[in-house]
Amino acid sequence: MQSLSDKVALVTGASRGIGRAIAWELACRGAYVAVNYRSRKDLAESLQAEIEEMGGTALAIRADVGDPDEAAELVGQTVESLGRLDIVINNAGIWEGSRLEDVEPERLEALLATNLKSAFYVTGPALPIMKEAGWGRVVNISSVIGVTGYPGDTMYAATKAGLFGFTKSLARELARFGITVNAVVPGFIDTDMADDTGDETRERILKTIPMRRYGKALDVAELVAFLCESGDYITGQLFTVDGGYTI
Ligand code: NAP
């Protein structure tokens, strides 16, 4: 029997990058996976097809997780279609750099909604189901930028650091229900988001990573999968996967 064969997982932002790798890894361990996306239906459906081809179960579901109603609908649809909900991976995120004096209120709101408020909007409706089951996993994908900061990244860093407080407080709230809540803190990972920073920034960043390479989405996904299939006594923790960037 596979380690997650009786579980249902919801991965936000699973059409591309880190979320896609996480959804795949969970499916490989037997979980039924809700593959959330916002705009890339084609990619989410191709992942669903890949998972089905290897004998797994997946369902692509569109929702903007920065919208409370759409997030609640996403959880509802997951439970209705896949039967239950045991694992929530709050992964969806957007990056945007701006010097503080140029920060536009609506962009700040967009980053807060997608990167931080979404964790409230998605996890909240899932909790009654996990509590009833007496078992659950919540994994929040933060960033090393939330730990170290980065010039021009006040918006992004604030949203990612906010997830640390969310993780620790919720872990304390839920420990007695058998639900663990942890944060995974990636360094610089090769995805579309990392491409957005441009070649010059990338070269500068590479020199600061002791392993001298960007991570792979799989490096992050394997850690997330471990926390889901094991880690019964691990909660409220931050796990960094960054090639040594924050040493
Ligand atoms: P990515 O390649 O840009 O993919 C982002 C994913 O999030 C896509 O599937 C996208 O869906 C989805 N998404 C964006 N806004 C959404 C919304 N409002 N509702 C639902 N889905 C939404 O990013 P990534 O690099 O894989 O990043 C994944 C997570 O890791 C993010 O939280 C990011 O902050 C964090 N992270 C990334 C790095 C890195 O170096 N790459 C480092 C540290 C942390 P659509 O394409 O369908 O719109």
Image (cartoon, rainbow, N blue to C red):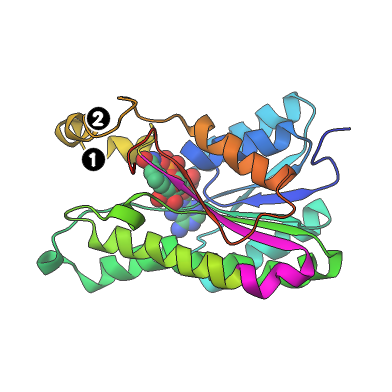
- Sooner in the amino-acid sequence: mark 1 or mark 2: 1
Pointer 1: residues within 10 angstroms few (<14), some, or many (20+)?
few
Q: Which residues are magenta?
A: 171-187
Q: Which residue is mark 1?
A: 197
Relative to 120, is 15 above or below? above
The answer to whether residue 37 is left or right of residue 161 is right
Position in image of residue 221 (x %, y %): 57, 37
* Residue in the image at 30% along x and 25% along y: 212
Residue shown at 78% from the left, 33% from the top: 56
* 180 part of magenta stretch: yes
Return the residue nearer the eye: 155 or 207. 207
Report the residue that reaches farthest toward the front: 247
Q: Which sits in the foreground, 227 or 126?
A: 227
Residue 64 can be seen in this image: yes
Q: Tell me residue 192's x, y (percent).
A: 36, 36
What's the amino acid at mark 2?
Leu
- Look at 66% across and 54% down and name the residue there: 234
**Image quadrant containing the C terminus:** top left
Q: Amino acid at mark 1?
A: Thr
Q: Quadrant of residue 113?
A: bottom left
Disc 1 from disc 2: Cα separation: 12 Å
User: Can residue 16 be seen?
Assistant: no
Which residue is drawn at the image coordinates 79% and 41% (left, top)? 4
Q: Position of residue 232 (x, y in %)?
A: 75, 53
Image-quadrant location for residue 151: bottom left
Identify the residue position indicated by label 2 in the image. 206
In this rendering, position of residue 138 left or right of residue 183: right
Q: For numbered disc 2, what is the local secondary structure? A: helix
